[in-house]
Amino acid sequence: MSPSAGGLVVFLLSVQVIQSQDGWGVNYRQTDVCAAKGSEVFITCDYTHPPGIDPSDIKDTFWFTKEKDGEPVDLTTDSEYSGRVTYGCNGKSCYLSITDVRESDSAEYKLTLMTNKPGEKYTGSPGVTLSVTDSGLQVQVRRSDSTWLELTCHSSCVLSDRAEYVWYKNEENIKTGSSLLVSSGSTDRYSCNLRGSSGQRSPAVYGPQRPSVSASPSAEMLEGDSVTLTCSADANPAANYTWYKGDGTSDPRLLSEEPQLVFSSIQSSDFGWYFCTAENQLGRKTSEFILIRVKYGPQRPSVSVSPSAEMLEGDSVTLTCSADANPAASYTWYKEHEDSPRASGQIFTITDFTAEHSGNYYCEAQNEMGRSNSTLLLITESGVDGTTRIIHITRWPLLVVMLILLLVFCLWTRKKKAVSSTTEPHESREAVEMDLHPECEDLSDMAAQREDPEEQEDRV
């Protein structure tokens, strides 16, 4: 016989119809079957025969993949399938079962019908193509509600209608079925396999383990360097990552929702504690804190004075210098116009204050990254009451303005006293003027002794 074939192949539920002109035909319910190694494959079909053929005339039916001398070889006689193949027919419906399938079983399987007439047979061709893979099983996770997750076992290929799944929890067989409900936040590992299969199970799904964090470079971080923080956690499905800055004492600040946190030019303000979280559908874990230490030179130091009120001659005054720096700064105290430092250390104390101590003071903060000077601090003894006044000088132009105002006040006072003395003898007026000259001259000398403002800014 020379049968002709026709029909449509689509997917699992489609049926390929093979018919010849004389009424023979085989309808395979699946034309492509994919199986995991070690599983069982079940192939079914229906056949038709010409009206003139009685069912009793069909004496044999068998399945084959190979031919020898142009004749099909019964699978039950093939040593490669020994003990693994069974087949049969019930009326015009036939089946083929192959257990513990192997990659070598990948082939095209066909049904042959033989009648009691010598040489009369029919083969349903094309047949069913079987593809055997290592596994192809995956567990998909879907949130059922706020408390439960639904796990579903899926294969990357179309399996037999008779395929059943077995579920494992931490290597223990717990259930048979296509899906499994587990509690949200579970720390267990879940996997599935085909029932009766000796093949590989699906990869296990589980929530993230505690994330690890790393910094690159891990050595010294200098201000302006490029620094990358990386968060990683063992999880399946893969975790989503979030980076935060905070030390746990207040609400953290969200920085990034990527596995890596990148500082293209790290600054002193980036100094602090960081941590990350790893989360997937099965749970969420938080990493340990990592401290980012950025090395930078001292910022402009600030100076505090104690006591801050007026002091009398003979009192003690304590100056304290502080500057933001990493590593911590060392401090040196200077008096203006003196080359040698007055003191070293963060605190400078002047005991038994006298007029000789009056002047401009500043501190210098220094570390391996650089140095910075504070603004000037003016300490003066004022007048006859012996009190001491302390003035922070932030800009020399301000001092110049203050001196000018003092000079104007002095001249105005001088003029006023001169006018009020016009009724006194000439000698007395001259005496008043003589008394006023030294005071104004002292102020004039004080203004003249000030250095050029730009030179002072350079010193500060």
Image (cartoon, rainbow, N blue to C red):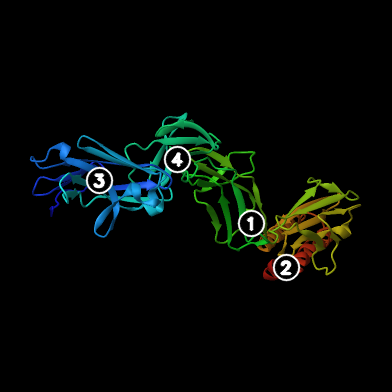
Q: Which residue is mark 3?
A: 11
> Quick check: 81 left or right of 345?
left
User: In the rendered image, which residue does mark 2 sit on?
Assistant: 459
* Sequence-first disc among 4 and 3: 3
Point 66% across, 63% down: residue: 397
Q: Residue at x 69, y 63 (%)?
A: 396
Q: Position of residue 260 (x, y in %)?
A: 53, 54
Amino acid tagged 4: Asn
Q: Amino acid at mark 1?
A: Ser
Say whether marks 4 and 1 touch (CB < 8 Å).
no
Give the amino acid type for the residue marked by disc 3 in the picture.
Phe
Q: CA distance from mark 4 to mark 2?
A: 79 Å
The residue tagged with tag 2: helix, strand or loop?
A: helix
233 w.r.t. 336: above or below? above
Kind of element beneath mark 3: loop
Q: Which mark is residue 36?
A: none
Which residue is located at x 39 percent, y 51 percent? 79
Label 2 crowd bin: few (<14), some (14–19), many (20+), radius 10 Å = some
Please, what is the three-letter code of the amino acid marked with disc 2? Arg
* Residue linked to disc 1: 268
Could you classify mark 3 by the number of other residues whose Cα lies within 10 Å: few (under 14), some (14-19), or many (20 or more)?
A: few
**Residue 433 showing in the rendered view:** no
Q: Are marks 4 and 3 in contact (CB under 8 Å)?
A: no
* Label 4 SS: strand
Residue 269 placed where, x, y %?
62, 54
Q: Can residue 191 be seen by looking at this rendering?
A: yes
Residue 363 x %, y %:
77, 60
Q: Nearer the viewer, mark 3 or mark 1?
A: 3
Mark 3 to mark 1: distance in Å? 63 Å
- Discs 4, 2 touching: Cβ within 8 Å: no
Up the image or down, 96 lies above or below 3; here it is above
The residue wearing badge 4 is 193
